[in-house]
Image (cartoon, helix red, strand yellow):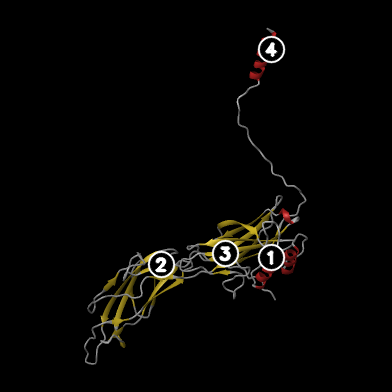
Amino acid sequence: MKKVLAILLALVLVLAFSVPVMASVTEVEMIGSDENAYVPIVKAKWETSDSWCSSDDDTTKSGTQVLPIVPQGEKTVYFWAVVTDRPLLDIKHVWAEIYHPDETLKVQIELEQIYCTPWGEDNWLAAADCLEYADLAGLVKYGLTNLDGDDIDFGDVYTELFKGEAKMYKGSLTFVHGQPGGFYSVEVYAQDQDSTSVRLVNCFEYVRTVCIEQDFTTVDFGKLKIDEVQKVSGDEDMTTDNKPTLKNGGNIDTTVSVHFSEMYYVDTAGVVTDVELEVVEFDARLGELTTVDPILPCDITPIGDIPICNTWELDLSIHPIKLAQDEAGVNLVGIYRGTITITGEDNGSPTPGTPCPPLPMMP
């Protein structure tokens, strides 16, 4: 009887301490390992137009210029930085923030250490040489002071790289068609487990480039009589014949102009003579914009703007008012031939942003 009672008491105790499972709040407080630790420093930074240390698409200008691939190609820009810390192994991340010419953030990318192997072996001499190439090309922006408060210059950074007292980092970003040209600001900063460096800022120029594609080499107005008007309508298909189309293959909004030449008589042998169609007017319309009329031969005439990435139809018409005459005063009917030239000009949109301040060149 006592044994039974003992078992019952044990069961009661077990049941008394059994409670439902309930969710609890989790919490963590991140702390630094050493309040007296050094803050990392971005000692130098630059950009290149290719993967090599000193690539620059226009060596006549200070800093880095990157030319887009037109029409409608992709271009990869590379971002470089030299960072130090004490101890050097404390560096955890190096970031680059790239800003549009209108000063809005485009993207943030993380830079990775280069000239090192997966086994931790570093090629310090190669990193130092890379910096020298970039400095000789006039691409490098240096920080203000190093960990000891001394000024930062090429010799200081080169020596630290050569001695293995700083690391070189690199990242990339591909600019696709439609990315507007202008001046892009880049801010680079480093983080260790305790702190974040001061940002080192400079910019590069994504060169604004006009590129208007057209799908025609001839415009045939057909047959018409004196003082009649003939129109050739375009479309938005770059593959159709005698239906003119224009496409903005550059990296800026572009003002389109047309330039009609004089038209000259073609003789029976098919040779263009020096006999000019005496009075003729043209007109043109771009997309759904207002028709520009009249356009006289030899006048370069703006007809409208095509935004980046757009394909618009081009409507053209001709109005011959007075024909040339032969020596007997008879109108010279037949074929007259001339040319039409399409040109484009940067219309200032989207904004180019603020030009990059010049960087000092090596003496």
* Cα distance between the residues tagged 2 and 1: 44 Å
Q: In this view, does 261 lie to the left or right of 322?
A: right
Identified by mark 2, the residue type is: Lys
Please rate how many residues cluster around mark 3, counting C-alpha atoms within 10 Å: few if below 14, some from 14 to 19, many from 20.
many
Vertical comparison of 77 with 26: above or below? below
Q: Which of marks 4 and 2 is nearer the N terminus?
A: 4
Residue 247 numbered tag: 2
> Which class describes the residues within 10 Å of circle 2: few (<14), some (14-19), or many (20+)?
many
The residue under label 4 is which amino acid type? Ala
Q: Quadrant of the N terminus?
A: top right
Q: Which mark is residue 127?
A: 1
Residue identified by numbered label 3: 77
Nearer-N-terminus badge (3/1): 3
Local secondary structure at mark 1? helix
Q: What element carries label 2?
A: strand
Q: Is residue 225 left or right of residue 235?
A: left
The residues tagged by marks 4 and 2 sit, at their Cα atoms, a distance apart of: 93 Å
> Which residue lies under the disc numbered 4?
6
**How far apart in space, not on screen, are marks 3 and 1 (Cα)?**
19 Å
Q: Nearer the viewer, mark 2 or mark 1?
A: 1
